[in-house]
């Protein structure tokens, strides 16, 4: 079981698909799963039911993943201790992106409920989470200026070695 962690826009979903293909494992995109399960977009879930509701669904899903798979988590998964415990059954890979890369990639994004408002608030979340990602990770890969293919190769090599 592989868990990809990292901030919004770090490329978790894209890399999960590539890793899944290379390792012949199913891919679980957690946000998509939760949207399907609840029949509502993450954005609407946040505005209608609030962030704690989403976080609860996120934890339940994580705890219920049993099949060997590549799991693309949401950026906030590291904020709950029980999520870290649930990920202990597999390898946790941190896709580390710089603040500049995240901002470039998320320009104009209106789907992510936590990517809005003051730049200083978003940056604080980014900064506060760095140590959480690092502590949760078995393996860290820098993604700045690398293509998804390059990142996938690096991960596969490191998993072997
Ligand atoms: C979140 C990241 C999102 C999604 C939700 C909360 C976060 O996933 O789970 O909007 O707290 O960083 P991505 O990291 O895939 O954007």
Image (spheres, rainbow, N blue to C red):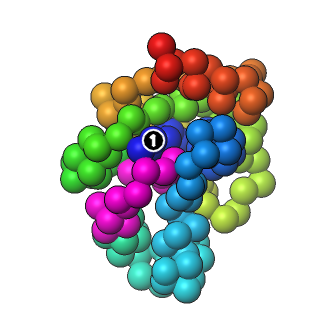
Residue 95 colored magenta? Answer: no
* 147 vs 102: above or below: above
Which element type, helix, strand or loop, lies under badge 1?
Answer: strand
Residue sitting nearer the eye, 39 or 98: 39
Which quadrant of the figure has residue 3? top left
> Which residue is located at x 48 percent, y 32 percent?
94
Q: Which residues are magenta?
A: 59-77
Toward the top, the furthest residue is: 161
Which quadrant of the figure has residue 99? top right
Residue sitting nearer the eye, 33 or 117: 33
- Quadrant in which the N terminus appears: top left
Q: Position of residue 62 (x, y in %)?
A: 35, 59
User: Can I make out residue 148 in this image?
Assistant: yes
Q: Which residue is disc 1 drawn over? A: 2
* 159 vs 68: above or below: above
Residue 66 colored magenta? Answer: yes
* 13 vs 32: above or below: above
- For label 1, the crowd category at 10 Å Cα-Cα, with few meaning under 14, some 14 to 19 and many 20 or more, is many
* 74 vs 120: above or below: below
């Amino acid at each position: 079981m592989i868990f990809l962690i990292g901030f919004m826009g770090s490329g978790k979903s894209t890399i999960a698909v590539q890793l899944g293909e290379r390792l012949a494992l199913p891919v679980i995109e957690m946000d998509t799963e939760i949207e399907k399960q609840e029949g509502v977009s993450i954005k609407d879930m946040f505005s209608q039911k609030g962030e704690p509701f989403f976080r609860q669904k996120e934890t339940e899903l994580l705890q219920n993943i049993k099949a060997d798979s590549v799991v693309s988590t949401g950026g906030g998964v590291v904020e709950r201790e029980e999520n870290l415990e649930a990920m202990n059954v597999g390898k946790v890979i941190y896709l580390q992106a710089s603040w500049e890369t995240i901002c470039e990639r998320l320009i104009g994004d209106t789907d992510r409920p936590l990517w809005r408002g003051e730049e200083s608030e978003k940056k604080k979340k980014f900064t506060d989470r760095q140590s959480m990602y690092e502590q949760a990770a078995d393996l860290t890969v820098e993604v700045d200026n690398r293509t998804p293919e390059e990142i996938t190769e690096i991960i596969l090599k490191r998993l072997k070695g």
